[in-house]
């Protein structure tokens, strides 16, 4: 990309041109939007504390990219984070604060074009392990070097186009508070402070946890449907089956409560779990006759499974969530 594209004329001071020879793009990362799975990244040999902190923030942002706009920025003191999402993949970078936003997004656009041209979208969708496209790391490093030392190759987009696009659609600046709040809500985390003041969160939802939630939702739906259906017959039979209706609706409410306790942190969690489990057991025993033995065992097994997984889902230190 020549000087006229960069907007740097021949009469500009030499120190302005020298700015482009600095390492202004320090780190780049490609992730899958739906779950934040890292696909490829540049190699980083720097031990700058702020850079390491920004990489951790990249990890946090990547978990909830689907809730953010297709492009945005998180401003810092010396370093900024920029991200651009397209077709289920997000391209993220940590840049020096002196780098203009238009140039950062020019880099991300070129990175997007290069990744789309060389990587199969089907493989991206089916990837199960982090960093499955290690061969693309060299492409990121080459592109990063081009921008740091030559101002960028402009593979598919020019700086002027990006600047015009940013004027038409202004960049959304996100705060760290917004990122943390969105990340906590989307992942079912409820952050709390320990006595030492360190932020903690619940461990991520596991595959058995998702299965238990699906089964519990199924049980709650069955309880609600049976309860509503019995209400009609209760009105016709002089309220003879009112207690069966109460039992079904209590079981429904307890199933919902169990899902909530699994997803979100709560004080006295153990006591609440045991109370909900006890009510589910009593309600289903009361319904013996309206349900056969296998149906009762299914409902009780699901309730016990959710209770065990809820009690075993512990709080983890926030510091254990290492960066990219």
Image: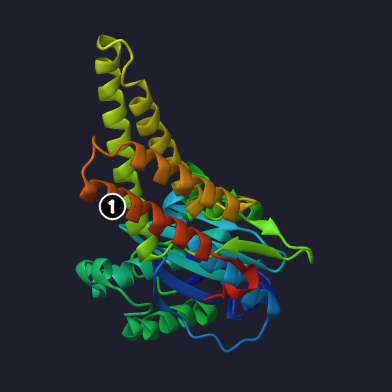
Left or right of 297? Residue 209 is: right
Q: Which residue is depicted at the point 46% across and 42% down?
A: 279
Q: Secondary structure at mark 1?
A: helix
Q: Which x, y percent locates residue 127?
A: 28, 73
Residue 4 seen in the figure: no
Identify the image quadrant of residue 10: bottom right
Picture quarter with the N terminus: bottom left
Q: Which x, y percent locates residue 161?
A: 42, 55
* Residue closest to the eye, 217 or 102: 217
Q: Is residue 170 above or below residue 90?
A: above
Q: Could you tell me how many numbered marks the image carries?
A: 1
Left or right of 101? Residue 34 is: left
Q: Which residue is depicted at the point 54% across and 67% down?
A: 58
Identify the residue at the far right of this view: 196
Q: Which residue is depicted at the point 42% across and 34% down?
A: 250
* Residue closest to the eye, 261 or 227: 227
Q: Residues within 10 Å of mark 1 (few under 14, many from 20)?
A: some
* Residue closest to the eye, 186 or 188: 188
Q: Which x, y percent locates residue 22?
A: 62, 80
Q: Which x, y percent locates residue 312?
A: 51, 66
Q: Is residue 135 above or below residue 271?
A: below
- Quickly name the residue at label 1: 297
Q: Which residue is depicted at the point 62% across and 86% down?
A: 46
Residue 71 seen in the figure: yes
């Amino acid at each position: 990309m020549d000087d006229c594209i960069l907007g740097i004329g021949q009469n500009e001071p030499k120190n302005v041109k020298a700015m482009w020879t600095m390492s202004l793009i320090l780190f780049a990362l490609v992730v899958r939007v739906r779950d934040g799975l890292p696909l490829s990244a540049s190699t980083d040999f720097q031990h700058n504390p702020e850079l390491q902190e920004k990489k951790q923030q990249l990890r946090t942002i990547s978990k909830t990219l689907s809730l953010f706009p297709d492009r945005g920025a998180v401003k810092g003191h010396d370093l900024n984070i920029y991200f651009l999402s397209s077709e289920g993949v997000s391209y993220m970078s940590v840049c020096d604060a002196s780098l203009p936003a238009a140039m950062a997004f020019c880099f991300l656009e070129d990175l997007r074009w290069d990744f789309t041209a060389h990587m199969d979208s089907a493989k991206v969708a089916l990837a199960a392990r982090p960093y499955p496209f290690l061969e693309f790391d060299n492409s990121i490093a080459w592109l990063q070097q081009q921008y740091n030392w030559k101002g960028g190759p402009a593979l598919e987009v020019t700086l002027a186009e990006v600047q015009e696009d940013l004027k038409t659609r202004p960049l959304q600046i996100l705060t760290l508070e917004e990122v943390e709040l969105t990340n906590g809500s989307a992942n079912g985390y409820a952050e709390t402070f320990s006595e030492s003041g360190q932020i903690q969160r619940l461990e991520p939802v596991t595959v058995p946890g998702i299965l238990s939630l699906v089964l519990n939702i199924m049980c709650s739906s069955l309880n609600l449907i049976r309860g509503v259906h019995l209400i009609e017959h209760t009105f016709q039979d002089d309220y003879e089956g009112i207690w069966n209706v109460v039992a079904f609706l209590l079981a429904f409410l307890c199933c919902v409560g169990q899902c909530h306790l699994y997803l979100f942190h709560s004080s006295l969690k153990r006591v609440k779990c045991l109370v909900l489990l006890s009510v589910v057991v009593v309600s289903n025993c009361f319904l013996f006759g309206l349900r056969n033995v296998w149906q009762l065992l299914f409902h009780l097994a699901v309730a016990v499974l959710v209770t065990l997984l809820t009690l075993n889902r512990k709080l983890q230190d926030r510091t254990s969530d290492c960066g990219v």
